[in-house]
Image (cartoon, rainbow, N blue to C red):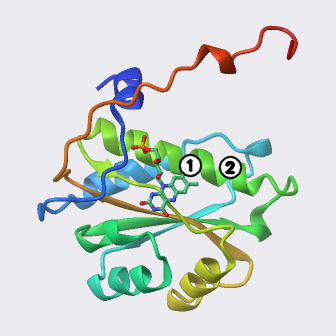
Amino acid sequence: MDAMKAIFSRRSIRKYTNKQVPDSVVKEILEAAMSAPSAGNEQPWHFIVIKDRKILNEITKIHPYAQALNTASVAILVCGDLKLEVHKDCWIQDCSAAAENILIAAQAKGLGTVWLGVYPRTERVDGIRKLLNIPDNVIPIAVIPIGYPAEDKPPAVRFDPSRIHHNKWS
Ligand SMILES: Cc1cc2nc3c(=O)[nH]c(=O)nc-3n(C[C@H](O)[C@H](O)[C@H](O)COP(=O)(O)O)c2cc1C
């Protein structure tokens, strides 16, 4: 799938079939994540691959909008490591770029995903950190379940010329 097709066809998929995602595909998706740009190439990310059904269930008790984890057999938790940060506060953008690469790479592989926001909701950050033994310097930013889609969504057309400005705001 070419990049533009993957970008335009991606939608949040919250129901998955029970077909397992091969480890080799998860690895490829993680390679895509780590290919993201980052401030000064600081690459402040860590990724926790979660397959343990008990842990996936526990996350749904901490995160009020994480029902998509119910049918997922694997999820990637994207985290930012403040100790790896060189350019202050850029870790959020770096990790978001990595998270978006996960969504697009998975789409290109015929998989569905949804970005479940964790940071900056303190109760989700604290709850997930405790559940997964994540150190204080590492901040979970998003949980991304990955699976073969069990729902079909048409591409969303959101292009809005009124949001484009030329040279100056007005
Ligand atoms: C920062 C962020 C946080 C999000 N958090 C959640 C979430 O907690 N639960 C959820 O089901 N979807 C979540 N989403 C997915 C959005 O609801 C979804 O991307 C948006 O409605 C647009 O739909 P689409 O992804 O199908 O194009 C989140 C997306 C982003 C970027």
Answer left or right for 16 relative to 11.
left
Q: Quadrant of residue 169?
A: top right
Q: CA distance from mark 2 to mark 1?
A: 6 Å
Crowd rating for badge 2 (residues with CA inside 10 Å; few <14, some 14–19, many 20+)? many
Q: Residue at x 77, y 68 (%)?
A: 82
Q: Quadrant of residue 79?
A: bottom right
30 in relation to 166, above or below? below
Three-letter amino acid code at the position of disc 1: Ala
Answer left or right for 44 relative to 145.
right
Crowd rating for badge 1 (residues with CA inside 10 Å; few <14, some 14–19, many 20+)? many
Answer left or right for 34 relative to 136.
left
Counting labels gives 2
Circles 2 and 1, Cβ within 8 Å, touching? The answer is yes
Disc 1 element:
helix
* Image position, residue 106 (x, y; %): 34, 45
Using the image as rendered, state which of residue 148 and residue 68 is in the foreground. Answer: 68
* Image position, residue 20 (x, y; %): 16, 63
Q: Pick the quarter of the image with the C terminus.
A: top right
Q: Residue at x 51, y 44 (%)?
A: 100
CB at mark 2 closer than 8 A to ligand 1?
no
Q: Pick the quarter of the image with the N terminus.
A: top left
Q: Residue at x 78, y 8 (%)?
A: 166
* Image position, residue 8 (x, y; %): 39, 27
Disc 2 element:
helix
Three-letter amino acid code at the position of disc 2: Asp
Pointer 2 residue: 94
Pointer 1 residue: 98
CB at mark 1 closer than 8 A to ligand 1?
no
Kindly identify which numbered label has been placed on residue 30.
none
